[in-house]
Amino acid sequence: MSFRAVGGDRPLRLVQVGAGGMGRAWLRTIAADPDVELVGLVDLDLDAARAALDDARLSGVEIGRNTAEVARATAADAVVNVTVPEAHLVVNTEALDAGLPVLCEKPAAPTVATAMVQAAIAEASGELLMISQSRRYFPALHALRREVKGLGAIGTVRTDFFKAPHFGGFRERMPHVLLVDMAIHAFDAARFLIDAEPVSVYCEEFNPEWSWYEGAANAAAVFEFDGGIRYVYNGSWCAPGLETSWNGSWRVSAAHGSAEWDGDGPPVVHRPEAGGAVPVPLETGAQEIAGSLAAFVAALRTGRRPDGAASENLRSLAMVQAAVQSAETGQRVRIDDVIEKARQEALEATDRDDVRSALRARG
């Protein structure tokens, strides 16, 4: 996929869509990055937009309810979409059709089919649509990936994730809450770490008797990756005591040694022939959503496709959908089957010839 680069020696002019809780975090992140400038904020609730700007101590920002109108009024270069997943298709389509690249909060969409439509719209428009998988942007994860490449063939990668958050609100009512709302971070990081693609998954989920969630808060999944590598995810959102990092706790077993990462500090690598476990030095770099923003800006400046391009992100979302399907059916599910079914659903869901052409090209 190629896309239009944005030249110039000034900061990129951004319009943000969404002024809720996550929107406020993005406002602070944008304000702290000298490579970008917030010129517009879009939200259906204008009072909420004003309050968010006041909270971030930002002034001189255009406010409105329509993305394209605010972008035109401010001569914006790009859009940051921080709306709820159900609104991503509408907002992203409006921005892309207006000739604006988009950095969109994860997940790209509630379903792989809807995410695929958005990726096809981006391709047809010639603009970049990037999904902010923010937990890829930790120096420790990048260091772990670099060290794992020197350990030879990978056998198994494991993530343990145990937290006990009381969110209240919609999350505590969601079906498949852990898989749908949180596990995509680990699944996407596993693709990045292993540097290969998932083939299939078998997943079981359940709810402990003490759970405060209506949907299953526990899940265990075994993915097969290309080359026979196994990725094992074991997680819970109602596990008080001895909680892991929000990044989970990771272990990699490979031909010439093993590596561990507690999700917070530097990873540790153990090569038996080298005499023991050694902490890995970390490089500095932007983290989480600041890392996503930096990668987005770099992609637009250079024209080089980022890791989080919407078309590349589809398989991370497909891992989630396949795990849910496996948990519901008790069967092993192939990732390619999920992708192909989503492509057919996407073709049926759009009446745009340019989008249909892009979707058919994926077949």
Image (cartoon, rainbow, N blue to C red):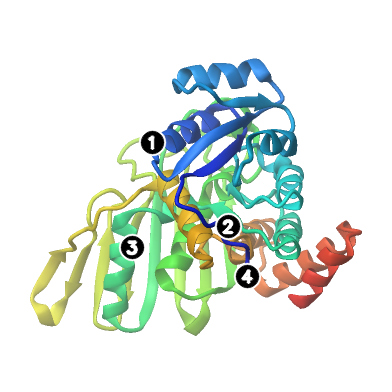
Quadrant of the drawing holding the C terminus = bottom right
| Amino acid found under the numbered disc labelled 2 | Glu
Q: Could you say which is closer to the camera, residue 243 or residue 84?
A: 84
| Amino acid found under the numbered disc labelled 1 | Ala
Who's the residue at 57% across and 47% down the image? 206
Q: CA distance from mark 1 to mark 2?
A: 42 Å
Who's the residue at 72% across and 72% down the image? 337
Residue 341 quadrant: bottom right
Q: CA distance from mark 3 to mark 1?
A: 23 Å
Which tag is nearer the camera, tag 3 or tag 2? 3
State the residue position of label 3: 142
**Circle 4/circle 2 CB separation < 8 Å:** no
State the residue position of label 2: 204
Earlier along the polypeptide chain: callout 1 or callout 2? 1
Secondary structure beneath label 4: loop
Tell me the tag on residue 32: 1
Would residue 284 be visible to someone looking at this image? yes
Looking at this view, name the residue that lies furthest to the left. 275
Earlier along the polypeptide chain: callout 4 or callout 2? 4
Horizontal relation, residue 173 to residue 290: left or right: right
Q: CA distance from mark 4 to mark 1?
A: 29 Å
| Amino acid found under the numbered disc labelled 3 | His
Would residue 172 be visible to someone looking at this image? no
Secondary structure beneath label 1: helix
Q: CA distance from mark 3 to mark 2?
A: 30 Å
Which tag is nearer the camera, tag 4 or tag 2? 4
Who's the residue at 29% across and 57% down the image? 140
Which tag is nearer the camera, tag 4 or tag 3? 4
Tell me the tag on residue 2: 4
Q: CA distance from mark 4 to mark 3?
A: 25 Å
Horizontal relation, residue 100 to residue 28: left or right: right
Instruction: Give the vertical position of 327 relative to 62 (above or below).
Output: below
